[in-house]
Amino acid sequence: MFELLYGAGAAEQERRRYAALMEGMSPQAGFPPEFSAERENVRIFSAPGRTELGGNHTDHNRGRVLAASIQMDAVAAAVPLSSRQVFFRSAGFPDVWVNLDGKDGVPDLSPQPEEQGTTESLVRGIAAEFARRGIQIGGFSANASSTVLPGSGLSSSAALEVLLAKIFDSLYGGGKCSPLELALISQKAENDYFGKPSGLMDQAASASGGAVAIDFISPATPLITKIEFDPLSAGFALCVVNTRGSHADLTPDYAAIPQEMNAVARYFGKSFLREIDLSQVLSNAGELRKSAGDRALLRAIHFFNEDKRAAAMAGLLQKRETAGADIEKQGLMGQFLDLVNESGDSSWELLQNLYSPRNFREQGLSLALAVSREFFREQGIKAACRVHGGGFAGTIQAYIPAEGLEDYRGRMEALFGPGALTVLRIRPVGAVELPYARN
């Protein structure tokens, strides 16, 4: 199981990580005695981070995306409690304690204003959504750690949410929730309790595992299709490069993207761009410039093309699964990489989410893409790069032929510092309770 989750080279290191979490739940290790547990009673859970492969800023307008879970994950050693208290310890963060019974033993699963924006709010929100669905809930103690790089667009927050949902589901719900249900429960807690109006892509990719094509035409019941995809087997390293730009004060920039796309849709009496088509927008471009502005028009054009591109990328990977000859597989991979580059171009030119116009001196993402493209030309290699995730700061994504990886790493780390480049491995398993925990 460890090799499946992390690859053969990392299996032993991960075994030690899990063992340390279990051993850390004893009073001798400093775990609160009232929440401690014997190692043989502990159960182990894992939820991965995710990478966005296609569909940059399409999900919030009911579009299509392509995403995948990765080898970096949030894991926890957990044990049920007789009370309805939750104690959650995670390395590097303050301890979390939530009493789901509220004051005087009266259950209280309503949002608590003082908890908004905290892990406590996620615990309470996830428990509340399980209860709303008629699924039993209870308390537990957990010792956790995460290898999902924060601030890198790999969704450390979604990994944590899905991890908590998986613990509740396995300890009290019989492990019967589907990946989509775990994702929806996690999203509900983030939206209504944590206070962040996120989409569902991150949680769905973390819960499902592997590469997934997700169609959000019906957000409550998105269509999720699993796809076999291993870039390494195609001869490419899938990387993210952290430009280490500041994410401070970017909320208005992120919020403006769906707001402007929705403004275009509202011109036609609709709420989302997926409800109209590009020809309608172009036919009314003159009036839309007046009502929504030029940038909104450009972002709408990005949406329609990126939505189709994400679907086409998924289609190429599905064809690759059944392709017979290696030369056919290589040709399909080449087409896929072309679409990755097109996605990067569209985000740069139309979506305009590479840097904040309020801080034009900091353009790490633009620089990373420009230098990457120069590297590809210099080396004469077939490769690809694009914006990864929300944009404005953070990471780009790149597909680099395995033989050119170390030279590319050197180029990127000379710009953005040691450790800026991380090679990702697509993990075929989503949120899971490990059988190992019962041994």
Image: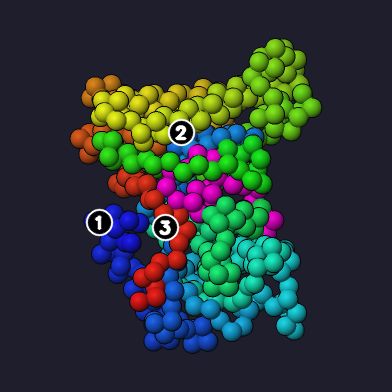
Q: Name the side, left or right, on which 52 lies relative to 322.
A: right
The verdict on residue 198 being magenta is yes
**Residue under pointer 1:** 8
**Residue under pointer 2:** 314
Q: Which residues are magenta?
A: 192-214
Residue 4, position in %: x, y? 32, 56
What residue do we see at 25% from left, 29% from top?
A: 326
Q: Residue furthest left?
A: 403
Disc 3 is placed on an element classified as strand
Residue type beneath disc 2: Ala
Residue 126, position in %: x, y? 63, 63
Marks 3 and 1, the one that precedes in the sequence: 1
Marks 3 and 2, the one that precedes in the sequence: 3
Question: Looking at the figure, which quarter contains the C terminus?
Answer: bottom left
Question: Looking at the figure, which quarter contains the N terminus?
Answer: bottom left
Q: Quadrant of residue 262?
A: top right
What residue do we see at 56% from left, 67% from top?
A: 169
Residue type beneath disc 1: Ala
Q: Nearer the viewer, residue 13 or 241?
A: 13
Residue type beneath disc 3: Asp
Q: Residue furthest right?
A: 269
> Dot 3 surroundings within 10 Å: few (below 14), some, or many (20 or more)?
many
Residue 63 showing in the rendered view: yes
How far, Cα to Cα, is label 3 from label 2? 24 Å
Residue 161, position in %: x, y? 55, 59
Disc 1 is placed on an element classified as helix
How far, Cα to Cα, is label 3 from label 1? 16 Å
Disc 2 is placed on an element classified as helix
Residue 407 showing in the rendered view: no
Q: Nearer the viewer, residue 243 or 176?
A: 176
**Residue under pointer 3:** 73
How far, Cα to Cα, is label 2 from label 1? 27 Å
